[in-house]
Image: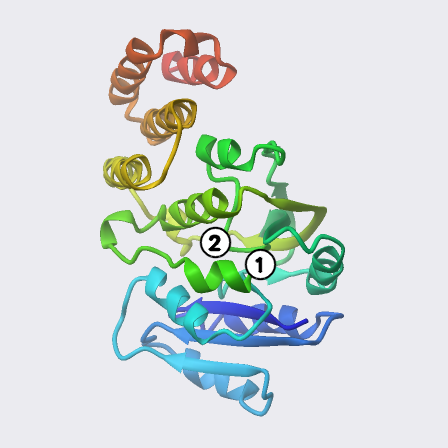
Amino acid sequence: MLFSIIIPTYNRAHLIEKTIESVLNQTYSNFEVIIIDNYSTDDTLEVLKKYSHDMRFKVIASDKNYERSRSRNVGMNNAKGNYLTFLDSDDLMQPTCLNDAYEFAIKNQEVEIFHNKYQFCYHNNEIINTFQDKPNHNKPLNAILKGNFLACIGVFINERLYKNHKFLEDVAIIGSEDWLFWIQIISDTKKLGFINKVNSFIVEHSERTENNRNPFEFEKQILFLKNIVINQIKLNKIEIKLFELSTNFLIANDYCDFGEKKIAFKKLKELLKKYPSYFFNIKILNLIKNILLK
């Protein structure tokens, strides 16, 4: 079984070696690595020359700086694996990641997409926390509509799915493009497998995209995503309600997190006016508490 590992990168000369070494340390060796350099202006391409002797590695250099969705799509278009997984150029794999994925795929051949657990850590490998969300894998579409518990790390997609689905490259959705991608895939296959083991690490640092955004842009991004999902994906009334609740909550919560509590309160009132029964949801009650705290 061949695994395709897609690594988009941009100006990660100081980080990407550690990422690649985590791939080379895999106990399962039948893989290909497709690195898409998004027109880096640092020494990333020079660093990558170190691995040019390994025929499992392929580097594709973009002719200009595009958004990361395009880089991932280029990787998928060039992939030959039975299964494909994404790995950002600042993140890491546990040595048994691919082997565990192989064993899961062999035992669960009807499952076209599955994922493992991941942890957040610092550069020195100190663990910050483990992602704690516990989605209902028996109802994966409902689970992903409630919130994006998947990341572009530690998720394995079989060939049928990655050949038929691509990331939307519209700049208006950048930041939530992966959530749309997972919703589209899970609505297609209706199943989601799970390896109950931490096999992936997201490295926390100041340059992470997630650490460099503002809530006003986030709202535009989420509303753009919401419009696409509701109008282009076949959802029933319950699924639409779940998605509306989750997206509206995320917007309000994000404003609160960034200190815009008046706006957060306004967004929360709009949500509860439409869905008053949601008032006693534990997430809503926690958000109200956070808004009221000085």
Task: Indicate left or right for 274 with 23 as reference.
Answer: left
234 or 82, nearer to the observer = 234
- Residue farthest along the bottom direction in this orientation: 53
Mark found first going from the N terminus, 2 or 1: 1
Q: Which mark is residue 76?
A: none
* Picture layout, residue 205 above or below residue 59: above
Q: Give the residue displayed 28% in from the left and 25% down from the top.
A: 260
Task: Indicate left or right for 141 with 220 as reference.
Answer: right
Residue 87 visible to an observer of this rendering: no
Label 1: state its secondary structure.
loop
The amino acid beneath tag 1 is His
Residue 129 visible to an observer of this rendering: yes
- Res 37 quadrant in image: bottom left
Q: Position of residue 134 (x, y in %)?
A: 62, 33
* Picture layout, residue 276 above or below residue 217: above
Report which residue position mark 1 lands on.
123
Label 2: state its secondary structure.
loop
Q: Position of residue 269 (x, y in %)?
A: 29, 12
Report which residue position mark 2 lands on.
205
36 or 208, nearer to the observer = 36
Q: Position of residue 161 (x, y in %)?
A: 49, 58
Q: Give the residue displayed 33% in from the left and 39% down from the top.
A: 229
- Res 123 quadrant in image: bottom right
Q: Residues within 10 Å of mark 1 (few under 14, many from 20)?
A: some
Image quadrant for the N terminus? bottom right
Marks 2 and 1 close (CB-CB < 8 Å):
yes
Measured in 3D between alpha carbons, the distance from the residue under mark 2 to the one under mark 1, in whole angstroms, is 8 Å
Q: Give the residue displayed 69% in from the left and 64% down from the top.
A: 98
Q: Position of residue 232 (x, y in %)?
A: 30, 42
